Amino acid sequence: MEERTIPGAVISRLPKYYRYLGILMDEGVERVSSAELSRTLHATASQIRQDLNHFGGFGQQGYGYNVQYLYESIGKILGLDSGYTMIIVGAGRMGLAVASYERFEKRGFSVVGIFDRDPGKHKDVNVRGITVRGLDQLPEFLKNNQVDIAALTMPSEGAAKVTPILIEGGVKGIWNFSHMDLDVPEGVTIQNVHLSESLMELGYRMNHLPDHTKKVSASRKTAKG
């Protein structure tokens, strides 16, 4: 089945399923029904079944889903079994936080390089044996190492300048934390992460709570006063 036949909304829900199934495995749960999944994942049981049916279903009527099998199957769909190599471009607080997050590696994303326009500011930084290199070393590094993904944790102007270098160097996936929506050619995938937009969406949701929820919140404030 070709990837383009799968709706984007379905793909965006797969990591959530994968994460929760991992929690169930840690708790020793062997099987789970779509109804049980729906209570935690805030999706209907029908939606969960439809999502999984895009990839073959995996469940048995009257039994539900084998947790480990479904976890491993979704991992393969996400490509986690093959693994990805990743570099961080921009060694500020965000970049170093991404590079230091150990769960990425457990999910199959291995950081192999960190780059910054001013590596001298980070000469004492060492993240799991990786030191910060200058951007001038990036083309040579890409030439000598297979890099699947580049995380751009730098200002928009710098991200725009470095993107052609990454594409020329064979990078096929860009995880973009900058405020600029970058143009990439066919064959290169980009995932934009706009933190301010996510925060504003949170503000919207808080500002448009159901009336009964607003009343409860107001009563709590009155009680505290």
Image (cartoon, rainbow, N blue to C red):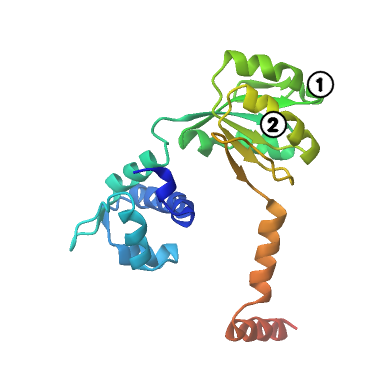
**Residue in view at x 27 percent, y 50 percent:** 56
Q: Quadrant of residue 63?
A: bottom left
- Amino acid type at circle 1 is Gly
In the image, 128 versus 182, the foreground residue is 182
**Residue in view at x 30 percent, y 48 percent:** 70
- Amino acid type at circle 2 is Thr
Q: Where residue 134 sits: x, y (%)?
A: 75, 20
**Residue in view at x 62 percent, y 21 percent:** 169
Q: Where residue 18 sits: x, y (%)?
A: 41, 49
Pointer 1: what residue? 120
**Residue in view at x 32 percent, y 67 percent:** 35
Mark 2, Cα crowd under 10 Å, few <14 / some 14-19 / many 20+, is some
Pick whichever of labels 1 and 2 is earlier in the sequence: 1
Pointer 2: what residue? 163
Q: Report the number of numbered marks.
A: 2
Q: Is residue 56 left or right of residue 165?
A: left
| Residue furthest front in the image | 186
189 is higher (above) or lower (below) than 43: above
Q: Marks 1 and 2, Cα distance to the nearest angstrom?
A: 22 Å
- On-image quarter of the N terminus: top left
- At mark 2, the secondary structure is helix
Q: Where residue 106 sits: x, y (%)?
A: 46, 35
In the image, 23 versus 13, the foreground residue is 13
Mark 1, Cα crowd under 10 Å, few <14 / some 14-19 / many 20+, is few
- At mark 1, the secondary structure is helix
- Is residue 126 visible in the rendered image? The answer is no
- On-image quarter of the C terminus: bottom right
- Is residue 22 visible in the rendered image? The answer is yes
In the image, 150 versus 65, the foreground residue is 150
Q: Where residue 149 sits: x, y (%)?
A: 57, 31
Q: Quadrant of residue 116?
A: top right
| Viewer-nearest of discs 1 and 2 | 2
